[in-house]
Amino acid sequence: MLKTFSTILDTQLFKNTIVGVILLNAAILGLMTIPGLDPSMLALLDWLDHACLVVFCIELSMKLAVLRLGFFRDGWNIFDFVVVGIALAPASGPLSVLRAMRVLRLMRLVSAFPSMRRVIAGMFGSIPGVASVAGILLVIFYVAAIMAIGFFREIDPEKFGGLGPTFFTLFQLMTTEGWPTIARAMMEKMPHAWLFFIPFIVMTTFTTLNLVFGIVVTAMEEAKEEEAREDMAAQGIVISDESNEVRLAVIENQVKDAARELESLQKSLDRLLEKQSIARLKLESAEK
Amino acid sequence: MFATILSLPENRYFQYTIIGVILLNAVILGLLTVDGLNPTTVSLLTTLDEICLGVFCVELGLKLIGQRLRFFRDGWNVFDFVVVAVALAPATGPLSVLRALRVFRLMRLVDSVPSMRRVMNGMFAAIPGTASVAGVLAVMFYVAGIMATNFFGKVDPDNFGHLGVSFFTLFQFLTMEGWPDVARPIIEKMPYAWMFFIPFILVTTLTTLNLLFGIIVDAMENAKEEEAREDLAEQGIEAPEESNELRLAVIEQEVRKIREKIASIAAQVEKA
């Protein structure tokens, strides 16, 4: 029984069917947003939506039955589970926000295609590398917020009243959207206010760009490396997990060692040849 | 005993404690921004803030005594010193702006966490390489500032009345934020004014992008290299300072030499 489940789960036909159901579900949820649908149509769409949900539930139960607790070891499985689970939760009272969240189910399209999965995995993989840049941005924001409250609270309590509104205003400044309006208003009362605004804008746009670049470049490199690794694995070449820097240094050392070994090999060969020629000379003289 | 005390700043737990104090200080300064706190809370928070400041002073004092003048050779030490000293300066009269600057103390978090410090070091190391691009941008700004003040000073004194205001407006142009609102009224009076605005925006945004990309790419490479060097040092492998390109070329040459050597040895063996 479990074996048939796992063979069914692995067939391409089954996978394609699931993708088809996700797409169908997307179309249904899209149609339901049209205002003024007649009730019978709405009921039909609702029924179809439930049918899709049932298909997902069956698929996930089969996976759960086959993999048992191993199911939860893969982040993508957890994602599928949560996203389908949300649709099953009662969507009334304080939980009514969950009804809107059931659209998240369509994100399963990403987890259904390996190439899309790789892109997302690359992005997640770049997070540790850029965490320090994000940390710097956070420190800059916090320091700037406290300073801005001290400077501008009296002038414009709506924008710089407390930490919350100030963070929002600073985020607006970082996107450079409408910053001259804010800055000019402050400069009317405090002529030197530009000393705060311009460095803040320069520093944060700079750091943000750095952050975005870091994520994009690392994600691209990671996806490329992953692909290269798969290629290599297909050709039967094992490659190490080390960074290129480390691998370069290791190669350097190995080449140096090889050169040294070759040198000693040459020396012992010379010695051997010398011995051989001496032996031959002795043999020749003995023959004489 | 004295030596142990002086070596405290090198101790990992001592460093963690300092990071903890910086975070605590951040929370305190955040709480102090809350409107309408009652006076006892304010005085309590102020006392706590002063205690944090005391801890920083002790830490820097230990470092100063331990390293003497070498202390000032590291840029980060100078930064820490200035930022803590600002808080100690009297914050009255014309110096009252220093009171607001004491928040800079929280920036110490950046140099206390090694990975953040590495990112910042990478950025600073990238600056000399892009200084020429920054110079180009500065010259453009100055020339454009004088031109704009001469052209538009009478038409729109609010935005181009004198050099300072012009620089601010030009910076606004650089960020492309609301530039048509400034440019259109002027173009109404001077139809050819677009011949100044549009080239300025095109040229400066391009130069800025050049500058930003240069610094960021360089900084990322620097940070990566430094990280790799630390990794290698941990594994006990020595890494030369040369660029990767050069090292690859050297390796290729070495491998070629080795192969020649192998061929010559093989020939000798063959002959024997």
Image (spheres, coloured by chain):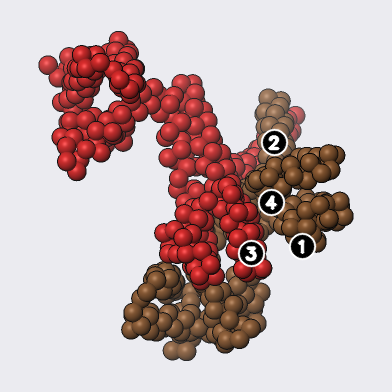
Q: Which chain is brown?
A: B
How far separated are the C-alphas under marks 1 and 2? Answer: 57 Å
Identify the amino acid type marked 2.
Glu
**Extreme residue toward the top, this view:** A13
Chain identifier of the residue bearing label 2 in the image: B
> Under tag 2, what secondary structure?
helix
Of A46 and A123, the residue lying toward us:
A46
Image depth: mark 4 or mark 2 in front: 4
Q: Which mark is residue B164?
A: 1
Task: Give the residue at mark 4.
Answer: B172
**Extreme residue toward the front, this view:** B189
Chain identifier of the residue bearing label 1 in the image: B
Counting other residues with Cα less than 10 Å from the Cα at mark 1, is it few (<14), some (14-19), or many (20 or more)? few
**Residue drawn at x 80%, y 39% as measured from the top left:** B194
> Under tag 4, what secondary structure?
helix
Name the quadrant of the C terminus of chain B.
top right
Identify the amino acid type marked 3.
Met
Q: From the top left corner, tell me how far across and down residue B38 is, in percent.
A: 33, 79
Q: From the top left corner, tell me how far across and down residue B166 is, in percent.
A: 77, 57
Q: Which chain is red?
A: A
Task: Give the residue at mark 3.
Answer: A187
**Residue drawn at x 39%, y 22% as measured from the top left:** A113
> Under tag 1, what secondary structure?
helix
Judge from the rendering whether residue A63 lies leftward or rightward of residue B254; answer left or right.
left
Q: Are marks 1 and 2 in contact (CB under 8 Å)?
A: no
Q: Are marks 4 and 1 in contact (CB under 8 Å)?
A: no
The answer to whether residue B245 is seen in the rendering is yes
**Extreme residue toward the left, this view:** A1
Task: Give the residue at mark 2.
Answer: B252
How far separated are the C-alphas under marks 2 and 3? Answer: 62 Å
